[in-house]
Image: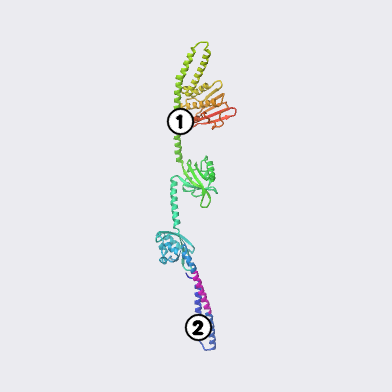
Amino acid sequence: MKDPKKNAAQKNLGKLQSQTMAVPNKFAPDSSLADQERVAHMFQELQTYQVELQMQNDELMLANEQLELQQQRFAGIYDLAPVGYIITGLKGEIEELNSAAADLFGRTKGELIGKRLYNLIFEEERNVYYLFLKKLVSSGVKENCQFRVQTQGRGQVFVQAEGIVIRAVNQCYIALTDITSTILVKQDLMKTSHRLALALDASNSGAWELNVSDMTFVFDQILARKLGVIPQKSIDFQVVAAMLDPADRPRFEQDCKTALFDLRIDATYCFDCDLLAGRYIWVNGSLGENFGGQQILSGIMTDVTEQKARQTQEEKVAGEHLRALVMARHAAEEKERNRISAALHDSVSQLLYGIQIKLGQVTGKKSEAALKEIKQLMQQAIRLTRNISFELAPSILIDFGLPAAVEELATRLSNAGLQIRARLVGFNSRLSPALETNIFRVVLELVNNCIKHASATQVDIMLRQTSAKIEIYVTDDGTGFITTLHEARVPGSGLDGIDNRIGLYGGNMQITRAVKTGTTVRIEIDNT
């Protein structure tokens, strides 16, 4: 490396030498006095030139000493720097390099000096270096590029090159940084991202982020394609909310706000935008921070429409299976009731009738009072047996249908202390035997509740049938036994059994208790 100060000193010294050599040529020796004076003057000038020359020589020596001191001071720093430094000519031949650069190539300095850097680069990427060097020399400003170099022992090494040209000495100063580990990490990250993208795409899923500071969404390419938006572009929260079905929008907005405190969101929503109309999307995410330290809610969205359809179908099949089991159980119960009712009618009732007849044949004044009491007890036993038989299996329901059975129920259970009135509207044709049986059992259970728990004196039964539904109203004037539906489920109330029966037909039940006016139970059953 040439020093500008040293060059200037050498030029001054040469100038003084030239001037000194030129002095004798100005004057020729002469014996005259004038000539002697001119010679004396010449020697005087020579002495002056000699002094100036000595001063210039001292300055030159001082400059050389300072230059050597600077070279010694920075030689160690340059050579031991962790970054590789190379000095090349304008054509790329290596003139000087430090230890880090030599280690980068896995060679000694002697092996590399004089070689062209172009030949140490992978052949596929030499054009990158050629354009870098050409632009560096022509522009005169700092340039950079990346390429792979061939090394001994390490294989390929990825290098970041930054250089600048020094016009005064026609040299290029180039710094080489080993970025192999960074490139390999980026390649692994790209592979992982690609695999993740393939997995998400295969599972109808995509990634999303919600920036908490400005409440804007950002979607990856998969979700952006499904939603019809631009990937990685911020989209206002309300714009995304508008893509959902109107029924799900309030829940979506509330869930997102709640997630900012609960730290998670995990729910399924129905979308109503062009590309996802009627599709169900599962949204799952958690609160965190991005690389910039901003709070974000991020996660995945998965199209679960097919899974939801399968789940709905499975639930439907399970419901139908349960309904079939309940219907089978009720059928078995009715069969057993019929058997017990027939046994009561054919055995116990006939036996009681026979005893009553025989008692009528007994005479005698002394036994008249006892016989009268026995007959009353027998009549009561016969009536109770017939009522039990009716409740177990009312033959009138099978023979004449629901209206007749309900009216008969009101008549049989009415007595001096309880009046039961029945009214049926719209039953112009028979229902299915199973539906008639279940409605009758529901009405019977509600009337028994009025008798057992309400201390009622009057019960009104009203059944109304339309093309869409069947309504059942049972109202009493008793003290009531409930304030809420939960409290109504006291032991013996039979409400669970009622729920099971009306649940077979998609029915629902409402119970209302008015102060001092008793209780009203309203049941609605689907009749479509």
The reply to whether callout 1 and callout 2 are in contact (CB within 8 Å) is: no
Q: How is the image coloured?
A: rainbow
- Which one is nearer the viewer's eye here, 226 or 373? 373
Query: In this figure, which residue is indicated by the disc labeled 1?
Result: 326
Q: Quadrant of residue 261 in the image?
A: top right
**In terms of secondary structure, where does tag 2 sit?**
helix
Q: Disc 1 on helix, strand or loop? A: helix
Question: Residue at position x 46%, y 67% from top?
Answer: 171
User: For the point 45% across and 40% down, which residue is it?
Assistant: 307
Q: Position of residue 71 (x, y in %)?
A: 48, 69
**Against 478, is 258 above or below?**
below
Give, as a three-letter code, the residue at label 1: Val
Residue 181 magenta: no
Residue at far front of view: 366
Q: Name the quadrant containing residue 99.
A: bottom left
Residue 364's mark? none
Q: Answer above or below: position of 175 versus 193.
A: below
Task: Give neighbour class at mark 1: few <14, some 14-19, many 20+ (Cα, 10 Å).
Answer: some
Residue 24, numbered circle: 2
- Front residue of this view, candidates 345 and 205: 345
Instruction: State whether residue 526 appears in this view.
Output: no
Q: Which residue is at the front of the view, 487 or 57?
A: 487
Mark found first going from the N terminus, 1 or 2: 2
Q: Position of residue 2 (x, y in %)?
A: 48, 70
- Between circles 1 and 2, the one closer to the viewer is 1
Name the kind of residue labelled 2 in the image: Pro
Q: Where is 45 relative to 415, above or below?
A: below
The x, y position of residue 31, in whole percent, is 52, 89
Q: Which residues are drawn in magenta?
A: 51-71
List x then y, in percent, for residue 317.
44, 35
Alpha carbon of mark 1 to alpha carbon of mark 2: how far?
A: 139 Å
